[in-house]
Amino acid sequence: MSTGLRANPNRLPLLAMAALVLVCLVGVAAVRLSGLSAQQQADAAALSIRQLRFEDRDDGGINVLEAGSGTLLAAVAPGTNGFLRSTMRGLVRERKRQGYGPDLPFELVAHVDGRLTLIDPGTQRRIDLESFGPTNSAVFAQLLPVTPGVHHVAQP
C-alpha cells in the first residue's frame, strides 16, 4: 500500500499551507537580514507650508482656497486636472469614512530637498506627490506661495 498523496487526498491542502508559511518566513528573514526597512525616510525640513481647502462648484469645477484668508488660489475647470481630482477624492473619501468634515484644511508641504507632501491632519494620511512624477507634482506645486529663487517642483 502506497503512502503517497493518493492515499490521503486531505494531505495536499495541508502541505500547500505549510509551504506558504515557509515562503513567508523566508521572505521576512530575507528582508530583516538585508537591512531593508518598511519605514519611510525622515522628511527633510519644510521650506513652505500652505493650508488649503478644496470646494466643489455647482458647475463641476473645484475652487482651491487658502484656508486662512479664503483667497482663491486656483479654479479647476469641470472635467480637467484628473490627478488633482482623484487625489482629493481619495482623501475626502477617507475623511468621510472616519467622520471628519471639510472644516479642517489640508496641508501642502514643500521640503528643502524638493519633495512635496500633501497631508490630511485629520486622518493623518499623507501623499508624497513626487512619487507621481514631476508633471503631477507640479499641479500641486503651483498652489504654493512663490518664494524668489526657490523652485518648488519635485526633482525628476
Image (cartoon, rainbow, N blue to C red):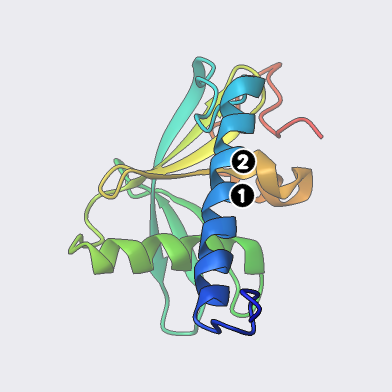
Kindly indicate the quadrant of the structure image that contains residue 98: bottom left
Measured as percent of width and height from the top left, residue 24 is found at: 56, 48
Q: Which mark is residue 150?
A: none
Q: Quadrant of the N terminus?
A: bottom right
In what element is the residue under mark 2? helix
Left-right relation of 86 to 1: left
| Residue furthest out toward the right | 156
Q: Which mark is residue 23?
A: 1
Mark yes or no: residue 141 visible.
no
Residue at the spot 66% in from the left edge and 51% down from the top edge: 139
Kindly indicate the quadrant of the structure image that contains residue 129: top right
Q: Is residue 126 above or below residue 39?
A: below
Q: Is residue 119 above or below residue 11?
A: above
Q: Are marks 1 and 2 in contact (CB under 8 Å)?
A: yes
Measured as percent of width and height from the top left, residue 57 is found at: 42, 76
Q: Which mark is residue 27?
A: 2
Left-right relation of 115 to 123: right
Residue at the spot 50% in from the left edge and 24% down from the top edge: 48
Q: Quadrant of the C terminus?
A: top right
Left-right relation of 155 to 8: right
- Real-space CA distance between mark 1 and mark 2, rounded to the nearest whole angstrom: 6 Å
Q: Nearer the viewer, mark 1 or mark 2?
A: 1
Residue at the spot 26% in from the left edge and 68% down from the top edge: 96
Q: Is residue 133 above or below residue 88?
A: above
Residue at the spot 49% in from the left edge and 85% down from the top edge: 59
